[in-house]
Image (cartoon, helix red, strand yellow):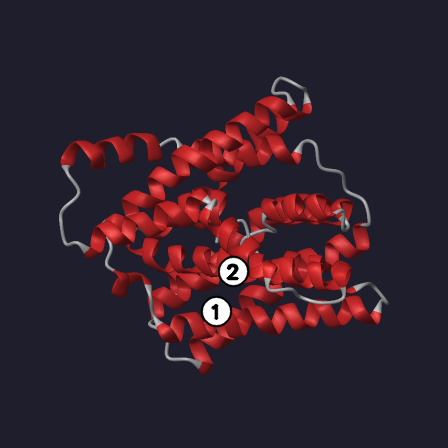
Amino acid sequence: MIEVLVRVLPFFAVIGVGYLAGRVAFISEAGTAAITKFVFYFALSAMLFRFASNLSLAEIWSTPFVLAYLTGCITVYALAMSVAFWRKLTLAEAAVEAQCAVCGNTGFLGVPMLIALLGAQAAGPELMVLAIDMIVFSSVITVLITAAREGRVSVGIIRVLGIGLLKNPMIVSMGLGLIWSATKVPVPGPINDFMSLLGGAATPGALFAIGASLASKSAERMEVAAWLSFCKLVLHPLAVGIAALVIFPVEAFSAHVMIAAASLPVAGNTYILAQHYGVAPQRVSASILISTAVSVLTVSAVIAWITLH
């Protein structure tokens, strides 16, 4: 555990540096937004394209893997929604809380950190988790909030979801990478070197951006945030682990990567969605802050466990 914690700490230390820079206003909110945009549209997209273009679809897609991850996610999602309804929250609020419970910071934290810690072979499973989070659950929360507000789900929502996915650079970069991979044409050396150079900025840039963005977050509704953090950091990896290791025949290493990805803290884009729709943004903000701080220990514990099994 201590050895893994020592390996994980540098990643969270960069988050800490970003947090301090934002907290003392060395980096303004506008500066944080600019760094985030650079990572999102350029550095991380380059990293994802490079991984996807050097992998085959068979190395990424696995039906048991997808079923196991969805089973674990849906279990925790349903639990979080049930607790929200028990507290007499609206459908929109319940959807936002459930999103916190199952959607982790897979893109900005998971891809760079887990691939660095677990090796390049973790790229395929990690990209699959990222794709499911972005395609399935980003769509689900949009549909549920729209249904809560309009009382129905119109055909037009499908168009909105489709356009949203096509505008997401992470989805586009992975898709283009897989298309290139399908041609069986090796990525030319200069292009691969360019993607490696640009993608190399993704890890420190993403971690710094996470920390700087946390500096503007507030820790209100602590009881709810603690519950959602518990769902994300403990119940989510536990449910995914049971589904992957007991219910479905997922290959051991891929199952371990999936469990590690499920152990990540609440995703930052959940706050963006909550703020966009005006549904419980402070609650999400507190959940991101608490889960990220506690995940230094919980993610280390999960990685320590999977490296021993």
Q: Secondary structure at mark 2?
A: helix
Q: Residue at x 37, y 74 (%)?
A: 63
Residue 171 placed where, x, y %?
42, 50
Residue 52 shown left or right of residue 9 in the figure: left
In the figure, 17 relative to 214: above or below? above
Residue identifier under label 2: 262
Query: Which residue is outermost to the right?
Result: 88
Residue identifier under label 1: 69
Kindly report the distance in space between the C-alpha atoms of the residues bearing marks 1 and 2: 9 Å
Please state which of residues 93 and 3 is positioned toward the viewer in this rendering.
Answer: 93
- The image position of residue 221, as x and y in percent, is 82, 49
Q: Residue at x 37, y 60 (%)?
A: 125
Numbered badge on residue 198: none
Q: Quadrant of the C terminus?
A: bottom left
Other residues around mark 1 within 10 Å, as few (<14) / some (14–19) / many (≥20): many
* Circle 1: element type: helix
Rendered view: 226 above or below 42: below
Disc 1, disc 2: CB below 8 Å? yes
Q: Residue at x 60, y 30 (%)?
A: 212
Vertically, is 25 above or below 260?
above
In this orientation, which residue lies closer to the viewer: 292 or 153? 153
Mark 2 is on which residue type?
A: Ala
